[in-house]
Image: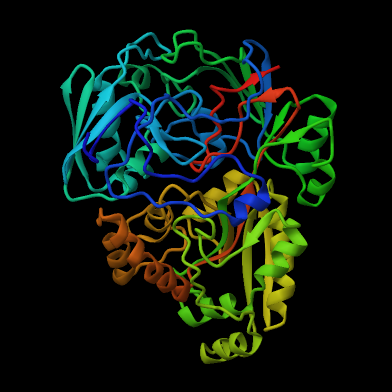
């Protein structure tokens, strides 16, 4: 078998991140980088999480508490992580990344790269949509035709701009045609593009009523309270899923979530108050999944209008912040301070820091003076009220920036208002996080390319687009890794995004809940979860 021909036959993976590790072991172990554009599928379908103990049991209800409420269940929009966390259990993708970083089959049981510009995917023949429609190649064609049509204005289109189209070769085979070589194609397929059914989309609004082939079917969405999913008995993976139902709740506070876990209202929660982690790790009444640094936290500086359309003022912020202090006072060691979105031990880690030695308050003041703001500056800091650690981050930043004459007005907003403000560029600084660990292109293309609907910082730069495109359209892994440090440094010096930490991602649950752990795609896939 060639390195471009991959099937679900147990072939050795080309990406190796390693098994679940303790936090200390994870932070000291290196990982191997993928060797080229043709990346392989493994033998088992679906995302595996190796946390189970003993034979899995069927039945039971998983009561989940996530950080935020959903806003839109249409995967074409991918609007807010809180929405994805739910509908990724309703839909399936062509391929996935498992907990060890391997590409594995989803609705595609195998694939091969035929030429630099064509990929062939073989589909499973036993998947059924929740409306009773059998999955065929036409559903994949429809999904990507809908996505790629500019008239539909779907934000996920930016991820697949090199894709010219998808052709149905047979009832269960599709061919992707590319306008040019596309390095992160497989990585993108694991991160976005759940497969949808045309008939289902026409019959019911997918923003409110998602219909996929996934392990759980949508039952109800009680706004501001919960979403209910139940087991899909015609799921294409034999014996899956195990759970009868999943109830998704979204309490607005870490403490409320933790109390709910301790009292039995929930049996799985996304986060706990960082300062409680040492205590909770000793508890016998709950447990945590292995921790992995999958989640970069950063500041977005609005480069589309004053004051931060002036690069010098963006650099002043970058030189004034103290990452180590933020991590110590806000995240209590649950984060790693870093200036790049892919820190150690990511295979993409560069060690690049254009502001090494910072904070440098004298340099920050000089940049303010050079930009005509020696007398001081007042700016807003936008943050989701549902994420108290980012509210606290703003409070620490306020004290740090005060030292150089910058007044920071911290403005917590409900998630819908926050998203509207980002889209409308109605902010100076905004706090956010993003998933990038499958491929760094997933960070820079959506957040900094001038054509992206997620370019909330408003950076419009031909040089930025040129650098992103060069990285994106190179398929040789060694060449991509060689050019990546320069890409990281250039954007650090541009200052429209300022990465300050990377969260050690892990989940908390009752001791009898198994099969749930962090994936580099940040999906909450519960098809392998069960209750003992």
Observer able to see residue 502 = yes
At 51% from the left edge and 64% from the top edge, which residue is drawn? Answer: 340
Position of residue 419 relative to residue 233, above or below, is: below
Q: Quadrant of the N terminus?
A: top left
Task: Please tell me which residue lies in front, 30 or 322.
Answer: 30
At 38% from the left edge and 8% from the top edge, which residue is drawn? Answer: 132
Q: Position of residue 474 (x, y in %)?
A: 25, 57
Q: Position of residue 498 (x, y in %)?
A: 54, 67
Q: Quadrant of the C terminus?
A: top right
Q: Disc count in the image?
A: 0
Q: Is residue 470 left or right of residue 50?
A: left
At 16% from the left edge and 48% from the top edge, which residue is drawn? Answer: 179
At 26% from the left edge and 31% from the top edge, which residue is drawn? Answer: 111
Position of residue 107 relative to residue 306, above or below, is: above
Q: Is residue 245 left or right of residue 144?
A: right
Task: Please tell me which residue lies in front, 448 or 61.
Answer: 61
Position of residue 517 relative to residue 208, above or below, is: below
Q: Position of residue 238 (x, y in %)?
A: 46, 11
Q: How is the image coloured?
A: rainbow
Q: Is residue 506 left or right of residue 195?
A: right
Task: Please tell me which residue lies in front, 410 or 356.
Answer: 356
In which quadrant of the rendered view does residue 344 lie? Answer: bottom right
Position of residue 204 relative to residue 294, above or below, is: above
Q: Position of residue 264 (x, y in %)?
A: 81, 24
Observer able to see residue 71 = no
């Amino acid at each position: 078998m060639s390195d471009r021909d991959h099937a679900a036959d147990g072939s050795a993976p080309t990406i190796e991140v390693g098994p679940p590790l303790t936090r200390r072991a994870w932070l000291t172990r290196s990982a191997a980088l993928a060797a080229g554009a043709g990346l392989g599928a493994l033998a088992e379908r679906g995302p595996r999480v190796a946390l189970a103990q003993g034979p899995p049991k069927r039945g039971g209800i998983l009561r989940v508490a996530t950080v935020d409420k959903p806003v839109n269940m249409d995967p074409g929009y991918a609007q807010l992580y809180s929405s994805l966390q739910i509908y990724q259990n309703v839909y399936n993708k062509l391929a996935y990344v498992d907990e060890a970083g391997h590409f594995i089959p989803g609705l595609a049981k195998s694939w091969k790269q035929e030429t630099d510009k064509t990929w062939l995917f073989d589909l499973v023949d036993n998947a059924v949509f929740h409306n009773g429609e059998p999955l065929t190649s036409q559903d994949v064609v429809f999904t990507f035709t809908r996505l790629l049509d500019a008239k539909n204005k779907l934000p996920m289109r930016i991820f697949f701009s090199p894709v010219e189209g998808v052709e149905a070769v047979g009832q269960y085979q599709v061919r992707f045609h590319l306008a040019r070589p596309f390095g992160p194609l497989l990585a993108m397929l694991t991160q976005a593009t759940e497969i949808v059914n045309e008939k289902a989309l026409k019959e019911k609004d997918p923003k409110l009523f998602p219909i996929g082939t996934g392990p759980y079917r949508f039952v109800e969405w009680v706004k501001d309270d919960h979403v209910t999913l139940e087991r899909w008995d015609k799921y294409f993976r034999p014996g899956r899923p195990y759970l009868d139902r999943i109830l998704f709740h979204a309490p607005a506070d870490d403490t409320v979530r933790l109390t709910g876990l301790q009292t039995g209202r929930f049996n799985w929660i996304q986060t706990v108050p960082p300062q409680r982690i040492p205590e909770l790790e000793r508890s016998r009444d709950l447990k945590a999944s292995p921790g992995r640094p999958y989640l970069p936290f950063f500041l977005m500086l609005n480069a589309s209008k004053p004051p931060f359309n002036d690069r010098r003022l963006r650099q002043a912020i970058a030189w004034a912040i103290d990452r180590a202090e933020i991590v110590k006072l806000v995240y209590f060691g649950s984060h790693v301070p870093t200036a790049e979105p892919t820190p150690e031990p990511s295979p993409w880690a560069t060690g690049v820091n254009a502001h090494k030695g910072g904070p440098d308050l004298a340099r920050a003041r000089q940049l303010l003076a050079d930009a005509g703001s020696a007398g001081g500056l007042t700016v807003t800091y936008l943050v989701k009220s549902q994420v108290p650690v980012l509210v606290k981050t703003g409070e620490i930043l306020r004290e740090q920036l005060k030292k150089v004459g910058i007044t920071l007005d911290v403005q917590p907003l409900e998630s819908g208002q926050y998203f509207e403000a980002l889209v409308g560029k109605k902010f100076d600084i905004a706090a956010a996080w993003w998933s990038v660990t499958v491929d760094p292109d997933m960070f820079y293309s959506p957040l900094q390319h001038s054509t992206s609907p997620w370019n909330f910082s408003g950076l419009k730069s031909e040089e930025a687009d040129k650098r992103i495109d060069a990285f994106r359209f190179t398929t040789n892994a060694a060449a991509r890794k060689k050019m990546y440090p320069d890409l990281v440094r250039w954007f650090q010096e541009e200052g429209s995004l300022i990465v300050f930490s990377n969260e050690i991602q892990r989940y908390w649950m009752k001791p009898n809940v198994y099969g749930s752990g962090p994936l580099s795609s940040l999906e909450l896939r519960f098809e392998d979860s069960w209750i003992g």
